[in-house]
Image (tube, rainbow, N blue to C red):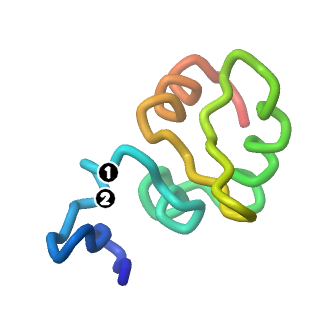
Amino acid sequence: MINAIGGNVKGKLVPIWEKYMLTIDEAVQYFGIGEKKIRMLISENADSDYCFTVQVGNKSLINRRKFEEFLNQTTAL
């Protein structure tokens, strides 16, 4: 079960800021960017050098550090 501050991994609560991969909902909370905007960024950058997602079935997981690097180099969303 996942809550607002982190996820449950094998019985241990992992704070969201320490997680390697984030769900879209977690990324919305962590980065303060809307869900539609994050989904748009994922689709626009899927084949670029800034590919920061991994598809697990229908679910997109966001590499937190790569997305942070992408945001640091971006001047406007």
Please name the residue that numbered disc 1 is placed on. Answer: 19
Helix, strand or loop for disc 2:
helix
Q: Quadrant of the N terminus?
A: bottom left
The quadrant holding residue 7 is bottom left
Give me the disc on residue 66.
none
Disc 2 versus disc 1: nearer the observer: 1
Residue 11: % across, % down: 17, 76
Note whether 42 is above or below 33 in the view shown.
above
Residue depicted at 81% across the width and 48% down the height = 40
Name the residue tied to disc 2: 16
Around disc 1, counting alpha carbons within 10 Å, would you say few (fewer than 14), some (14 to 19), or many (20 or more)? some
Q: Secondary structure at mark 1?
A: loop
Above or below for 46 versus 15: above
Q: In x, y percent, where is residue 59?
A: 67, 63
Looking at numbered disc 2 in the image, what kind of residue is underneath it?
Ile
- 28 and 56: which one is in front? 56
Identify the amino acid type marked 1.
Answer: Lys
Residue in view at x 50 percent, y 29 percent: 66
> What residue is drawn where x is 75% and y is 54%?
39
Residue 24 placement (x, y as % from top left): 59, 61
> Is 22 placed above or below 47 here?
below
In the image, residue 73 lies at what x, y percent? 58, 17
Work out whether residue 31 or residue 65 is closer to the camera in this orientation and state it: 65
Q: Quadrant of the C terminus?
A: top right
Residue 64 shown left or right of residue 16 in the figure: right
